[in-house]
Amino acid sequence: MFSSQTLGELVDQDSGRGYVLYNFGIRFYENVGTTLEDACTQLGLKPEPIIEELSSAPSVADDVLKFKTYPVNLIIEYLKHSHSIFIKSKLPYIGNLVKTFRATHADYTSIEKDLKILFPLFAQDFIQHIYHEEDTLFTYIQQLENTTSEMLNYGQLYFQMEKYSLQMFASEHEVHDDEMEGIRKITKNYHLAEHAPLQVKVIYYELMQFEKNLQTHAQIENEILFPKAMQIESQVRRAIREKIRFN
């Protein structure tokens, strides 16, 4: 059934299929009228794995509450894995959708222009934020955790704690909690008219999914990682004060 359908038909039925095709190297937005069978033949791909992926149920959103039972280091590894997916897969895909977007209706001409300016700026700022977070916040928390779990010399962390605090990181984090506000304004909260072109539907779908992922990501950090890490930070501070008192 899927093999004989065009790429445009497949994605029109389910916007999430565009990302599945993209991961197999099939750019639906470049050949909407090509059947899946012909696209596979052109690229030398076997259709069976693609059809299986297209047929599978969409992934269920992460249950944030389960992370409350996870240790800090495991939470950080999960967040880093999410960062990798954002940077290496999701952002390039959405970026390609935006770059190749050609408005076929007057209602979307200005949106096309604005998205092509704003989205690359958003992506660049977002990636810089992620790398900064990993290099500073995550590194600091892991040093705190290692100090308590491996009984390292607390003096190694003293100057880091003079420079940083989790309260400072939490305050900075709040500034980045609504990074997609500008994109929502441009798209009028991802409002789709009945005549919206296929690529607009997919772009809006992916932007909404990305925003949901960011909200889940921020919830894990704000409600679980920060409280756990602050407890560890307080424990280390008490230990340092005790060492100073007895020296």
Image (cartoon, helix red, strand yellow):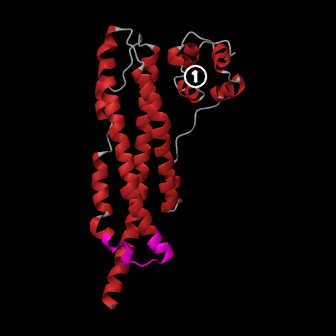
Q: Which quadrant of the figure contains the C terminus?
A: bottom left
Residue in the picture at 41% in, 25% down: 204
Nearer-the-camera pick, 229 or 101: 101
- State the residue position of label 1: 26
**Left or right: 126 with respect to 202?**
left
Residue in the picture at 44% in, 73% down: 147
Q: Which quadrant of the figure contains the N terminus?
A: top right
| Majority SS type along the magenta span | helix
User: Can residue 224 be seen in the rendering of this structure?
Assistant: yes
The residue stretch that appears in magenta: 146-159
Q: In this picture, is 236 found above or below 137?
A: below
Q: In this picture, is 160 found above or below 201?
A: below
**Left or right: 177 with respect to 43?**
left
**Left or right: 160 with respect to 29?**
left
Find residue 209 and report its image quarter: top left
Q: x, y percentage for residue 11?
A: 55, 19
